Image: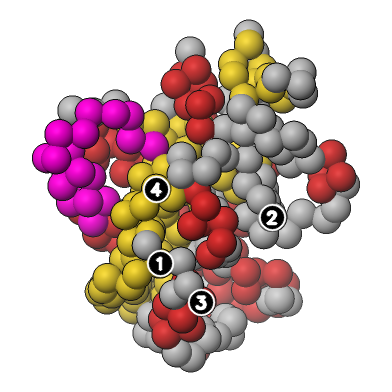
């Protein structure tokens, strides 16, 4: 029962007491009950939040993202994340710590980066590891949970208190996703790793010129570091840039998986379908922080 090993990290979003697995549900000491969906995720947004309009990715965006990522275009970025996390956790293991390692991907989307990290660490760590993902979009949680029974995915809102215990995690991932510095600090152990990925100014440079995608904030890295400085020590930042060739289906999926899809008129998307292929640059900045 995969959720049994992961439940100790979780707390009730209503009363903040620990959750435990009971049959097909997670239950707290106050008998608040959260059913584990057939697809394997659990919905931990309080009832008052469920009624509000979701700001997460739509089903169409998520399907486009899964189709695009399955082509391997972001694999080098994923590999860089995996190497960074493996290095951090291997160092921890070398100090004789044999306890379970808990990893959380905040804004996990459809689970691509978290599942590739799981497969990478499977061959490199002898310690037990639990893999958690959280996203506000129910469709994202569903898709991520379907990837593997080893991914423990919850629907929750990163802008509020997340349903996890203080200091529950050794590593947090945040890949092209919203950040909540105070919550990240609460969830990480002292000395824990926070790996943040943001786009460089060159990311999708050629495609932006064609598709009129939303721009990238100037000095984004400096702003991210400054916002996290109260709780985290900046360690380093590395850039990864490379060129890719996209066919017409890649172009459509890439555009539709981004927030820009909400702002583009149908005529623009139809025009992109006529593109036979696009050569564009991908750019990622991987920023490493440690919990102080």
Left or right, 266 with reference to 184: right
Rendered image quadrant of residue 45: top right
**Horizontal and vertical percent for residue 140?**
60, 45
> CA–CA distance between discs 4 and 2?
19 Å
Question: Between residues 118 and 15, which one lies in front from this camera angle?
Answer: 15
Residue 221 is one of the magenta-drawn residues: no
> 10 Å neighbourhood of mark 2: few (<14), some, or many (≥20)?
few
Location of mark 4 (residue): 189
> 10 Å neighbourhood of mark 4: few (<14), some, or many (≥20)?
some
The tag earlier along the polypeptide, 2 or 3, is 2
Left or right, 38 with reference to 176: right
Residue 84 against residue 266 in the figure, above or below = above
Residue 289 against residue 40 in the figure, above or below = below
The tag earlier along the polypeptide, 2 or 1, is 2
Considering the numbered disc 3 on the image, is that residue within a helix, a strand or a loop? Answer: helix
Instruction: Specify the segment rendered in magenta.
Output: 84-102
The tag earlier along the polypeptide, 4 or 1, is 4
The residue drawn where x is 50% and y is 17% is: 4
Residues under numbered marks 2 and 1 in contact, where contact means CB atoms less than 8 Å apart = no
Location of mark 2 (residue): 160
> CA–CA distance between discs 2 and 3?
17 Å
> 10 Å neighbourhood of mark 1: few (<14), some, or many (≥20)?
many
The tag earlier along the polypeptide, 4 or 2, is 2
Location of mark 1 (residue): 232
Location of mark 3 (residue): 227
């Amino acid at each position: 029962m995969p959720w049994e090993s992961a439940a100790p990290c979780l707390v009730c979003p209503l009363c903040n007491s620990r959750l435990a697995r009971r049959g097909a549900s997670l239950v707290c000491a106050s008998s608040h009950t959260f059913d584990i969906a057939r697809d394997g995720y659990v919905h931990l947004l309080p009832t008052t939040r469920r009624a509000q309009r979701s700001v997460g990715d739509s089903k169409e965006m998520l399907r486009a993202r899964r189709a695009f990522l399955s082509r391997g275009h972001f694999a080098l970025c994923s590999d860089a994340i995996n190497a960074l996390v493996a290095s951090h956790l291997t160092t921890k293991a070398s100090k004789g710590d044999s306890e379970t390692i808990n990893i959380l991907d905040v804004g996990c989307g459809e689970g691509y980066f978290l599942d590739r990290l799981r497969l990478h660490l499977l061959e490199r760590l002898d310690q037990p590891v639990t893999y958690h993902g959280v996203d506000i979009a129910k469709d994202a949680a569903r898709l991520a949970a379907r990837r593997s029974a080893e991914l423990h995915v919850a629907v929750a809102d990163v802008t509020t208190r997340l349903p996890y215990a203080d200091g529950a995690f050794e590593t947090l991932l945040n890949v092209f996703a919203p950040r909540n510095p105070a919550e990240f600090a609460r969830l990480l152990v002292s000395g824990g790793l926070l790996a943040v990925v943001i786009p460089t100014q060159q990311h999708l440079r050629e495609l932006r010129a064609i598709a009129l995608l939303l721009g990238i904030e100037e000095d984004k890295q400096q702003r991210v570091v400054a916002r996290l400085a109260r709780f985290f020590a900046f360690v380093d930042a590395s850039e990864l840039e490379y060129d890719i060739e996209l066919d017409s289906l890649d172009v459509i999926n890439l555009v539709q998986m981004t927030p820009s899809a909400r702002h583009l008129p149908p005529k623009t998307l139809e025009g992109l379908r006529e593109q036979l292929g696009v050569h564009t640059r991908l750019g990622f900045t991987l920023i490493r922080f440690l919990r102080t």
